[in-house]
Amino acid sequence: MQSESSTGSASGRIAIVQGLRTPFAKQGTLYKGLSALELAKIVVSELLQRAELDPREVGLCVFGQVVPSLSAPNIAREVVLGTAMPKNIEAFSVSRACATSLQSMTSAAEAMLAGQHDVAVTGGADSASDVPFTVSKRLADSLVAASKARSLAEKLSAFSRLAPRDFIPVPPALKEPTTGLTMGESAEKMAKEAGISREEQDALAHRSHVRAAEAWRRGVFSDEVMHVVPGPRYDSPITEDNLVRKDSSLEAYARLKPVFDRKYGTVTAGNSSPLTDGASALILMTEGKARSLGYSPLGYLKSWAYAAVDPAGWMLMGPSYASPIALDRARLRLRDLDLIEMHEAFAAQVLCNKKAVASEDFAEKLGRSEAIGDIDEEKFNVHGGSIAIGHPFAATGARLVTTTLRELKRRGARYGLVTACAAGGLGAAVVVEAEQ
Ligand SMILES: CC(C)(COP(=O)(O)OP(=O)(O)OC[C@H]1O[C@@H](n2cnc3c(N)ncnc32)[C@H](O)[C@@H]1OP(=O)(O)O)[C@@H](O)C(=O)NCCC(=O)NCCS
């Protein structure tokens, strides 16, 4: 972890110069013909143009994708090669599940704080519509054996023991490898054990849609969300997220059936983040470089922290573990914050984390003398969250950072916390500071 104070250099702060995202779209809808890489190239090209940044100034590209494309495993490098950036810009890809574009941002910042680069492009993209189906282990073994066979008879014999079920395509696993639980099942476990009611979850999801719809109506997102015009006809611009419900009603949530525990559960399609396609990106610079190029940044990275919990327990509690560390590193308390943006994987996860940070018992568990703090509703996910806006896994972190910094500016406020849970029991937290 590095922070302003720990760099010891006046130009040591990392500036977030600009951020941009595509509209987010429900799986299998507006972007069903586009891969994650294509979405990434679209957003990065537009970001560079909007920032009027000479691509030759960029030294590093760090990008991420959670559901990998087998044809382009290093998405960061393909983003460089597929945009106006010179081909000699180095690039690497990262994955930290739902916190991937927080990781791409902080990995680039670490390289910059080490003096290796002064301008970086970072972000993340995912397409839930373009997932890599693979083959069964038995068919894969047969294909390898056939590729090594020296005769037609040997080739044929490599397939001789396969059963019809071995030819069934295998979708990517959304289960935790160690527990076998999906994220939704983990959310369900947390809701049950913490006593989070269906009503509380539905109310939070409804709030998310109402706030996001209002933000769209008021034009809050217009500078941070680009228009995408997909080919081959290029005649239907996509200008808004298509998951935000402009007519959200609490009664409609109550009618939905639980998905992850059909009999006793409370987690539904309405109070979960949906499977989504989209991309987002940021331009980072050292403060000195930003000034020398004449930019007035959105803000600065103040501190960050990652943490982990046992995925067999309450898997989605990462924000409650990572946030106090990031706050300590920023020398701030929760009450000093002007905005808090928490990724809404599931309403149950958000509610569990809100309870934990307000709890003395949880603080004691962390070895702290007092609770981290109560989250003020008026500072929390003020323009809705992932439940309404959608959650293209790797794109969410950069979305949260851009929205937070723009809103801090709008309010003339200073400090924001961005936090996310992630598969594997991971948690991420970043403190940002708006340009004053
Ligand atoms: C929860 C999940 C399984 C639902 O998938 P789905 O069934 O395809 O969801 P849909 O969007 O089709 O919604 C199902 C129904 O609920 C309705 N619905 C969803 N949200 C609603 C809302 N806010 N209000 C009213 N109705 C709603 C839909 O209209 C749909 O109705 P229909 O069947 O009449 O068309 C899926 O979104 C999922 O897996 N989410 C979790 C993803 C995840 O694990 N992310 C990682 C977290 S970090």
Image (cartoon, rainbow, N blue to C red):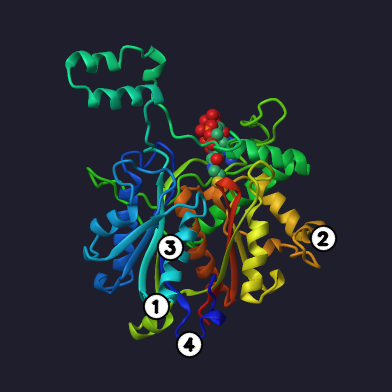
* SS type, badge 3: loop
Query: Are dots 3 and 2 in contact, CB under 8 Å?
Result: no
Q: Nearer the viewer, residue 201 or 87?
A: 87
* SS type, badge 2: helix
Looking at marks 3 and 2 on the same chain, the residue that comes earlier in the sequence is marked by 3
| Circle 1 residue | 115
Within 8 Å of ligand 1, the CB of disc 3? Answer: no
**Residue 277: quarter of image:** top left
Q: In front of the other: label 4 or label 1? A: 1
**Residue 162: quarter of image:** top left
Looking at marks 1 and 2 on the same chain, the residue that comes earlier in the sequence is marked by 1
Q: In front of the other: label 3 or label 1? A: 1
Within 8 Å of ligand 1, the CB of disc 1? Answer: no
| Circle 4 residue | 10
The Cα atoms of the two marked residues, 1 and 2, are separated by: 41 Å
Query: Are dots 2 and 4 in contact, CB under 8 Å?
Result: no
The image quadrant where one finds the N terminus is bottom right
Q: Nearer the viewer, residue 90 or 138?
A: 138
Looking at marks 3 and 1 on the same chain, the residue that comes earlier in the sequence is marked by 1
**What's the residue type where badge 2 is placed?**
Glu
Q: Residue at x 45, y 53 (%)?
A: 395
Query: Relative to 175, does residue 409 appear above or below in the rendering?
Result: below
Q: Nearer the viewer, residue 307 or 244?
A: 307
Within 10 Å of disc 2 (Cα), the crowding (few <14, some 14-19, many 20+) is some
